[in-house]
Image (cartoon, rainbow, N blue to C red):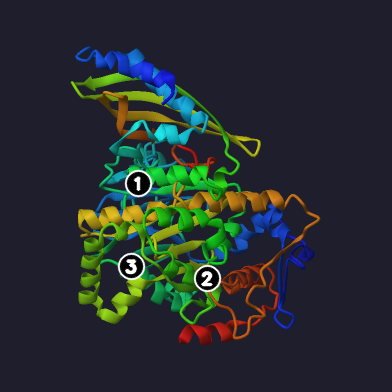
Amino acid sequence: MKEQPAEMFDNLIIDDVETATFKVNRRVFTDAEILEVERKKIFDQCWLYVGHESEVPEPGFYISRKVAGRPMIFVRDTDGAVQLFFDSCSHRGNSVCPNKSGKTERFLCFYHGWGFDTRGDLVVVPDPLGYGKKLDRSKLRLGSPPRIDSYRGLVFMSMKPDIVDLRTYLGGATEYIDMMLDMTESEAVVAPGRQSYSMKANWKLLLENSADIYHGMFTHMRFFSDYLTHMGVDLSSWRQITAQSESNKVITFDYGHSVVDTQVGPLPAFVDRPEVYERLRQGLIEKYGAERAARLMGRSQNLLIFPNLVMISAWRTIRTFYPVAPDLLECNGWAIIGKEDSPELREARFGNFIAFLGPAGFGTPDDVEALENCQRGFAATEVPWSDLSKGMARPGGSVANDELQQRNLWRRWYSLLNPDFVPGNETSSAMTRGAE
Amino acid sequence: MPAEIEEGGTKQMQANQMPVTRQTIEDFLFAEAALLDAWQLEKWLELFREDALYLIPPTDEPQLDRHAGLYLVMDDMRRLRSRVAQILGRSMWAENPVSRTRRLIGNVRILAQDAGELSVAANFSVYRMRHEAIDIYVGSYAHRLAITAEGLRFIERKATLDLETLNPQGKISIIL
């Protein structure tokens, strides 16, 4: 990467807590040079979500998947351990895993026939005599990212060798990851059927959007006013999400993570199946006690792990996304279910999920439309700033319906790009509210 | 009900016992495509039996059983009616104003038929024009059709995409 002129990063964000001003220069959404810097200074400096261990349930099961542009092989080896390799033959670079998923004992490069086992060891080299005694197989294993770690089956990788350990990186957010995964009586697993779609928008627009409560009742009017009404759902409890109340919290964490923790109304697929809902509730009470069960079922969290992992507990989803170009992102979404869910519960979970999420849901397409419209709007370079100050001047500090969570991620983003940036300090008011 | 659909199916079927021909199925599917391209979605809903399903499997596992994993669309009639009401309403921003669409339906085959029911396969390409861009959706239909006194009616309408991902389409905001 060529050295970037320092002034390139000047004045991308105006952050002034005193005057309740927070502005983001729209160049951050359109500039190809900024994207190149982001790849090195954001994506290569953070922990990145790869997949969940349940996606490779038995020895030999593998998935090939792109992470930060790198072709990765996510595999359970013959000893049952989850391994992560770059899908690039150590000989000349060809893919050793042409299938998206499957079960194998060996990854074979079809270019010259080199083969690797599920631990990444080089086990086949045609005509080894050609190398005399110089062939050191231990140096020709499949490559792995410098750091691999997992939390409750969620596997992450990092290109930064000296990054803090994953547990430290996730910090207080683990409490909310636990809530995402505790919503099942049995072991939480990722369901088959990935949602894979694009948006002609900058990746940070989806990051902002994924933690945004403010847009809900406008962008998603048809989900709430139309669909939920059609399903006979009482909207009054849903409308409380945007109310300024102590029960709708926003909590920011170190490293740019945040959670908005709100009460939710009844989910549509459960309204038709009260007995399924009740059985789940009883099961969760048995497993976790009444208090935690009530919290698991009556609230939803939009959890944002910087830079690109989103979990939303109302829909029980995992979502991650990457930039392809300044104005194009690729997004993948998965559903979390319980391994032992009854067929009825599974159907209800899928029903709730796709009622809102995904390319054909009643929520996501309108987000896509909004973000793509924003990106089109950025062509008006005479309107250079986006405003994210909501909540800064609210007496008592920001609530879930404000923009503190977006400011938090932007402060982290800018700190990684520009060491001279001094982020505004809003943490205390939010934490006070978060502590209850 | 548009005239061509009534004429296309019913007369032959009322004569009953006669096998339904491919031309009858083609007339039905072409007329259905015309309704969708004209955004006459309420009329389109009349082509479904009350217990019908509208399905789109995931793009990464198009053969996945609908009970085994997450589909992109898994509509019973209640959800499908809501989907149509949303599209025709004012707050589905992704289709307000509505896109232009054009559907090409081909390679129609009758796979099986008995007295009351047909299994039909067809290929589709659906073009969606909006914001001066074209999104193309390519795939195949697997329909289960009931032969009724009113004409053919969907029991199951399954659109399986051949796309590996929805890049660059981004969304399925139209009926496929």
Which residue is drawn at the image coordinates 77% and 67% (left, top)?
A10
Q: Tag 2, which chain?
A: A
User: Are there few (<14), some (14-19), or many (20+) residues within 10 Å of tag 2?
Assistant: some
The residue wearing badge 2 is A242
Do the CB atoms of the residues marked 3 and 1 lie less than 8 Å apart? Answer: no
In the visual, does A133 lie left or right of B21?
Answer: right
Amino acid type, callout 1: Arg
The residue wearing badge 3 is A181
Amino acid type, callout 3: Leu
For residue B53, say whether it is visible.
yes
- Quadrant in which residue B123 is drawn: top left
Q: Tag 1, which chain?
A: B
In the visual, does B49 lie left or right of B97?
Answer: left
Percent across and percent down for residue A344 are 22, 55
User: Could you give the CA–CA distance between mark 3 and mark 1, rounded to whole angstroms?
Assistant: 30 Å
Q: Which of pointers 3 and 2 lies earlier in the amino acid sequence?
A: 3
Looking at the image, which is closer to me, B59 or A404? A404
Residues flagged by tags 3 and 1 on a common chain: no
- The mark closer to the camera, 3 or 2, is 2
User: Could you give the CA–CA distance between mark 2 and mark 1, rounded to whole angstroms?
Assistant: 28 Å
Relative to residue A413, is residue A77 depicted above or below? above
- Specify the quadrant that holds the N terminus of chain A: bottom right
